[in-house]
Amino acid sequence: MLPKPRSRGRPSAQAEREREWGRAARGGVSEEAPSTSRGLGGSPQRARRPEAAPAVGPRSQKQLELKVAELVQFLLIKDQKKIPIKRTDMLKHVVGDYKDIFPDLLRLAAERLQYVFGYKLVELEPKSNSYILINSLEPVEEDAELRGDQGTPVTGLLLIVLGLIFMKGNTIKETEVWDFLRRLGVFPTKKHLVFGDPKKLITEDFVRQRYLEYRRIPHTDPVDYEFQWGPRTNLETSKMKVLKFVAKVHKQDPKDWPAQYCEALAEEEDRAGRQTAGPAPALDVSDAKGGRGKGAG
């Protein structure tokens, strides 16, 4: 989702996921395009494969991400009618040739629904293969203070943008934000089922609410803009809380991003120091009023 953490002697969740995708994408597949042939042609080995499925081409990481985005959109649309969503419908209308990795697709879609949109995918009854979306009743600690009167999905999108900004050195180009959000099925020129007009929400609403600063980058052709945290974000949350949110999404420890962790820790210590010092003493302005000081008659 965001810049990968430095290695700390154990594989990152992202790396494990990529290897998992690799295994799922390659499993038993040796042709690039779907094939209806009975064999590999010219192979001297004639061992029979039990119930061999039609061959499909290797899936790229981009193809897999798009399929997860399609599944998320399908679940959101079906949920509008508040009718249980059947596994067979998902397989028929969305999954298609990706049935061999359906459990992985469903798991990743569930994670995205929770962290981006604030919905939890729940199976109605064990082994019923029917699902519904419910609102997350207990928001993660890191986004609770930002929630305010905004809905959970909007807050999830805001936290993702705030995380991108912080992980990119506290400033990020608008084009980079949209490059990432497209992978989640959120496009600047398309109306979104949950967010409505995403570009207006991010570049106008969040800016007007002072969660974001949005500035044109000088001397860019074509014209580009950049985002930074706004003053309201600095008041309502902290770099450490946003880093914890990012780490929770990645199933990592905040310390796996050493530079960001040190920066967030320094901010925490600075805030604690200011709170310990207490409010500044009131100024005695009596000398400024008519030249009179204490004890002046």
Image: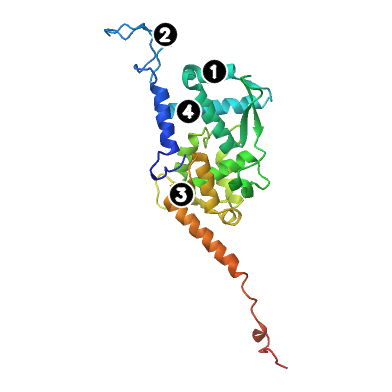
C-alpha span from label 4 to label 1: 15 Å
Q: Which residue occupies the foreground of this view, 199 or 52?
A: 52
Which residue ends up furthest to the front in the rendered image? 9
How far from the left and from the top, in percent, is residue 290? 68, 88
Q: Can you say whether 100 is above or below 279 in the image?
A: above
Q: Is mark 1 on a helix, strand or loop?
A: helix
Q: In which quarter of the image is residue 262?
A: bottom left
How far from the left and from the top, in percent, is residue 241? 55, 50
Q: Name the residue under label 4.
A: 66
Q: Can you say whether 296 is above or below 9 in the image?
A: below
Q: Mark 2 points at which residue?
A: 50
The tag on residue 255 is: 3
Q: Earlier in the sequence, mark 4 or mark 1?
A: 4
**Residue name at image x 43 percent, y 36 percent:** 14
How far from the left and from the top, in percent, is residue 249? 52, 40
Q: In which quarter of the image is residue 151?
A: top right
